[in-house]
Image: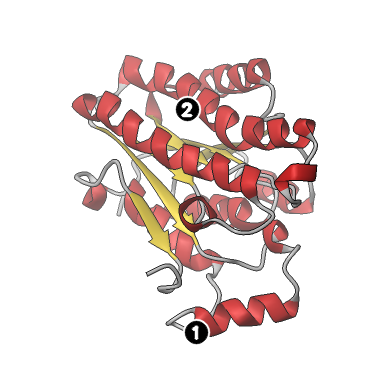
């Protein structure tokens, strides 16, 4: 596969899945304009190893103006007319029974996970529609949005909203060759699953037909495929990667 100097916007890049996606995209030859709220040694290493193909900025995904400014700056840099799409990976979660969950926490989860992704996609599409007749939008969802999980109501609502957003946007931009899909991973050992103890994770493994947790590589490989020309006729889908847990 050749990426022909294509660039992607990627959110939530500082650790876990976002960092794994950034590393794989760079290895595939893409340029990556990435954002997260914090910088760390892993990001510094990517900047040092790929100075011409990796751009990082600190962006609060709950701040629409900051998102717009990030995309505007990124598109003044190397991406320009080679902008191929966006991967909305930034996400957060707060645990708690809904009846006692503070409204500010509910609003923040929805703002980061759903509104932030919509705003980032909106800003990227404005640029892509000027210069391209094809491209990709990938939204990182969750099986929680499909099946739910006790104590994660706001998170589940945000991910279910992201799935609906993907389906609707696929209809809007399909006519210009841009595909829009969501990936719904199963439970992974990442920061977002830190609230699950070993016993809970073991129970999930026992209930999973393939008898293990989802791994970062499982999602990275699917994202790689969706970005490729081989996936040019796949759009409006939520693709579940959970080893059969929700089947």
Crowdedness near tag 2: few (<14), some (14–19) or many (≥20) residues, C-alpha within 10 Å: many
Q: Nearer the viewer, mark 2 or mark 1?
A: 1
Left or right of 178 on screen, residue 189: right
Q: Is residue 105 above or below residue 123?
A: below
Work out which quarter of the rendered image holds the C terminus and state it: bottom left
What residue sits 51% from the left and 80% below the top?
Answer: 207
Q: Quadrant of residue 34?
A: top right
Give the percent coordinates (x, y) of residue 44.
74, 47
Instruction: Tell me the SS state at disc 2.
Output: helix
Give the percent coordinates (x, y) of residue 79.
47, 28
Q: Which is nearer the N-term, disc 2 or disc 1?
A: 2
What residue sits 54% from the left and 85% below the top?
Answer: 206
Left or right of 198 on screen, residue 9: left
- Provide the residue designation for mark 1: 211
Instruction: Tell me the SS state at disc 1.
Output: loop
Q: Furthest residue to the front?
A: 99
- Provide the residue designation for mark 2: 121
């Amino acid at each position: 596969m050749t990426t022909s100097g294509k660039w992607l916007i990627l959110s939530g890049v500082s650790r876990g899945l976002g960092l794994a996606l950034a590393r794989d995209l760079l290895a595939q030859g893409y340029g990556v304009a990435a954002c997260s709220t914090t910088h760390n040694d892993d990001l510094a290493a990517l900047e040092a190893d790929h100075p011409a193909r990796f751009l990082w900025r600190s962006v609060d995904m709950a701040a629409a103006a900051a998102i717009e400014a990030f995309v505007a700056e990124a598109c003044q840099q190397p991406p320009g007319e080679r902008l191929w799409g966006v991967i909305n990976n930034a996400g957060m979660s707060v645990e708690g029974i809904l009846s006692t969950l503070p409204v500010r926490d509910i609003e923040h989860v929805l703002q980061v996970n759903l509104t932030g992704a919509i705003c980032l996609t909106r800003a990227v599409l404005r640029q892509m529609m000027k210069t391209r007749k094809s491209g990709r939008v990938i939204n990182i969802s969750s099986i929680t949005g499909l099946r739910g999980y006790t104590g994660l109501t706001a998170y589940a609502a945000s991910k279910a909203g992201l799935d609906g957003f993907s389906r609707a946007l696929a209809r809007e931009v399909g006519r210009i060759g841009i595909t829009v899909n969501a990936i719904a991973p199963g439970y992974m050992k990442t920061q977002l699953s830190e609230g699950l103890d070993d016993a809970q994770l073991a129970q999930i493994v026992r209930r999973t037909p393939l008898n293990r947790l989802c791994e970062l590589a499982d999602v990275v490989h699917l994202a790689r495929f969706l970005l490729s020309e081989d996936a040019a006729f796949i759009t409006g889908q939520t693709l579940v990667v959970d080893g059969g847990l929700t089947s």
